[in-house]
Amino acid sequence: MGANPPGKWTARTMKGVILAGGLGTRLYPLTKVTNKHLLPVYNKPMIYYSIQTLINAGITDILLVTGGNGAGDFLRLLGNGKEFGLQHLNYTYQEGEGGIAAALSLAEFFVQNEPVCVMLGDNIIERNIGQVVRAYEKQGKGAKILLKEVKDPQRFGVPVFDKDRILRIEEKPKVPKSPYAVTGIYCFDHDVFDIIRTLKPSARGELEITDVNNVYIERGLMTWDLLEGWWTDAGTFESLSLAGHLVSQTGTNTP
């Protein structure tokens, strides 16, 4: 949905980046002893779902950005990705909490000049996003985001529309101008890293991914699609419980 800019690359293998750092303070005291993304969601560690989502979309060159005292636990759990059929799984470490955009900036050495699909490690979805990834590859440049209609959009980045065109994204607005949330799945070209370098910290001292998306919107290089099936994050006790319930009742595209 939204007009696609003309393409400037063809049939490349997209890189995948999963952001699984942060301190997980909303899940304290569980996160006192481990990273949030290693907590169980029904019968699997949370991080399994985002890894499998990228693999199911055809993305097998994956970097995991983690942090905190439990970072070494990812290596013990995941190893080199053999359990997922990967030849190799890449890791990098984020010190502290600088925001989603700051975490993504650590992936520049890995992504280089390729397009990248970025996924927040606490996002869990029901369906396969392969079609979205293919559409972005054909798009050729700029960015693509996935939206989902939710009951509480004020918790998220919320798009403001003019018909089917996004004018801007507002971060956690008190009065949302649409019922849609920007999910934690993004496709970017390599210009994303230059954009991040221009950002200034927000009021909460972080580099915001919403600011990155708004730059692409201002340049006329943002498209969007609606995410099919259910979607939830798992960053609060309520959403962690909901994620486990949804997986147990309906399953996901994770084997």
Image (spheres, grey):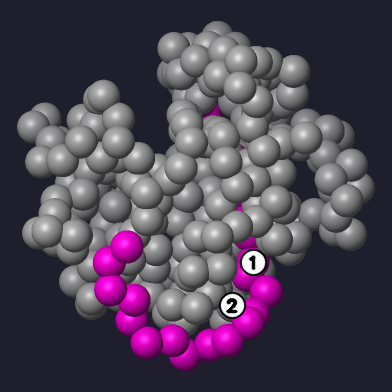
Q: Earlier in the sequence, mark 1 or mark 2?
A: 1
Contact between labelled residues 2 and 1, with CB atoms less than 8 Å apart: yes
Residue 10: say if magenta: yes
The residue carrying mark 2 is 114
Quarter of image, res 43:
top right
Give whichever of 72, 174 is nearer the camera.
Answer: 174
Q: Alpha carbon of mark 1 to alpha carbon of mark 2: how far? A: 7 Å
Q: Residue 23: x percent and y percent?
A: 52, 29
Quarter of image, res 45:
top right
Instruction: Estimate how packed mark 2 is, as few (under 14), some (14 to 19) or many (20 or more) residues with alpha carbons within 10 Å.
Output: some
Q: Magenta segment, which residues?
A: 1-24
Q: Please give left or right for residue 236 compared with residue 150 in the image.
A: right
Q: In which quarter of the image is the N terminus?
A: bottom left
- Name the amino acid, label 2: Glu
> Extreme bottom residue here?
8
The residue carrying mark 1 is 15
Q: Helix, strand, or loop for circle 1?
A: strand
Residue 5: say if magenta: yes
Q: Residue 55: x percent and y percent?
A: 72, 53
What residue is drawn where x is 65% and y is 46%?
53
Q: Helix, strand, or loop for circle 2?
A: loop
